[in-house]
């Protein structure tokens, strides 16, 4: 589904250039559950933005579902995102003056679906995530976990083939984080490709494949068979102040 070949990305500020991604090669198959890890500045968020067609790359190639994602105008990029990709963010990115149902329904507004139909669909997704009774509550009336479930429902309502999640558990306590990861696993079990950025060992260990970035290159790819040793590494480091990668 996703193919990246020799991908480079730099940011230029004044006379300075920061080379963020340095020749990445990567394949993610349809239906995989993948986490991307790395310390601050490793390039993980830049990579996620390129995968979500929110940012361009400088060199190399990024193909999504067999189509090259390059030199697209904003209309083309938005059309592809609306068709293929759902986004989940650490800060939830809910609209404060819209209730839960209206937030979930918002992507359907941009698809020209009638208000009655999109609100009906939003209620169905909220019910699936156990939030039907909270449908008419505003974001500031919801807990962090509830807000993230609203964000997940919003990401799912347009029936994307890929979910991109940037630190989806970063603002949540441990129990709620695990509940969110269980929801993402259920979404993945339905055949949707899920890619998350995280700096947490235990969260990454719940995925099928871990891509570890360091200084703009892929340092390591850990697959199913090696996740137990990865979890053991987490257990050894959990009590150290610098246990995050």
Image: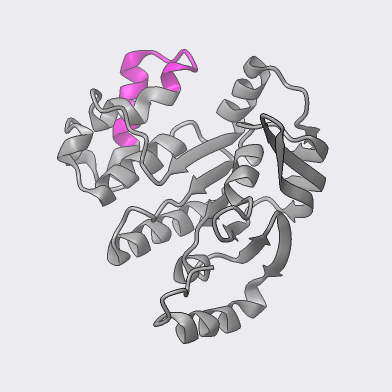
Task: From the viewer's side, name the closer residue of 31 and 95.
Answer: 95
Q: What colouring method underlies this structural image?
A: one colour
Query: In this rendering, is residue 109 above or below 196?
Result: above
Write the start and end of the magenta stretch as one range.
Answer: 108-124
Magenta segment, prevailing SS (helix, strand or loop): helix
Residue 202, image x, y percentages:
45, 71
At x 73%, y 61%, the residue is: 218
Toward which corner of the image does residue 81 lie, by quadrant?
top right
Question: Left of 206 or right of it: where is 132?
Answer: left
At x 71%, y 66%, the residue is: 219
Which quadrant is the C terminus positioned in? bottom right
Task: From the viewer's side, name the closer residue of 11 and 115.
Answer: 11
Residue 217 in magenta?
Answer: no
- In this view, the residue farthest toward the front is 15
Toward which corner of the image does residue 62 lie, by quadrant?
top right
At x 78%, y 39%, the residue is: 63
Residue 91, image x, y percentages:
36, 42
Total number of numbered labels?
Answer: 0
Query: In this rendering, is residue 199 above or below 117?
Result: below
Residue 227, image x, y percentages:
59, 77
Residue 109 in magenta?
Answer: yes
Question: Left of 241 or right of it: where is 42?
Answer: right
Task: From the viewer's side, name the closer residue of 96 and 115.
Answer: 96
Residue 100, image x, y percentages:
26, 32
């Amino acid at each position: 589904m996703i193919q990246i070949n020799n991908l480079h990305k730099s940011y230029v500020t004044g006379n300075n250039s920061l080379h963020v991604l340095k020749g990445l090669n990567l394949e993610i198959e349809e239906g995989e559950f993948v986490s991307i890890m790395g310390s601050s500045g490793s390039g993980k968020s830049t990579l996620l933005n390129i995968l979500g067609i929110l940012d361009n790359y400088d060199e190399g190639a990024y193909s999504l579902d067999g189509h090259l994602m390059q030199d697209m105008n904003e209309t083309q990029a938005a059309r592809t995102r609306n068709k293929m990709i759902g986004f989940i963010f650490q800060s939830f990115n809910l609209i404060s003056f819209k209730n839960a149902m209206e937030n979930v329904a918002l992507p359907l507004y941009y698809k020209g679906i009638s208000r009655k139909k999109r609100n009906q669909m939003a209620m169905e997704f909220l019910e699936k995530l156990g939030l039907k009774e909270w449908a008419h509550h505003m974001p500031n009336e919801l807990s962090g976990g509830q807000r993230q479930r609203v964000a997940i429902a919003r990401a799912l309502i347009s029936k994307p083939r890929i979910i991109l999640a940037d630190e989806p558990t970063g603002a949540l306590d441990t129990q709620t984080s695990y509940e969110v990861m269980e929801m993402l696993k259920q979404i993945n079990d339905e055949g949707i490709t899920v890619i998350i950025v995280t700096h947490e060992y235990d969260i990454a260990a719940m995925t099928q494949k871990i891509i570890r970035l360091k200084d703009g290159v892929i340092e390591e790819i850990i697959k199913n068979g090696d996740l137990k040793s990865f979890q053991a590494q987490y257990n050894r480091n959990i009590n150290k102040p610098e246990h995050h990668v």
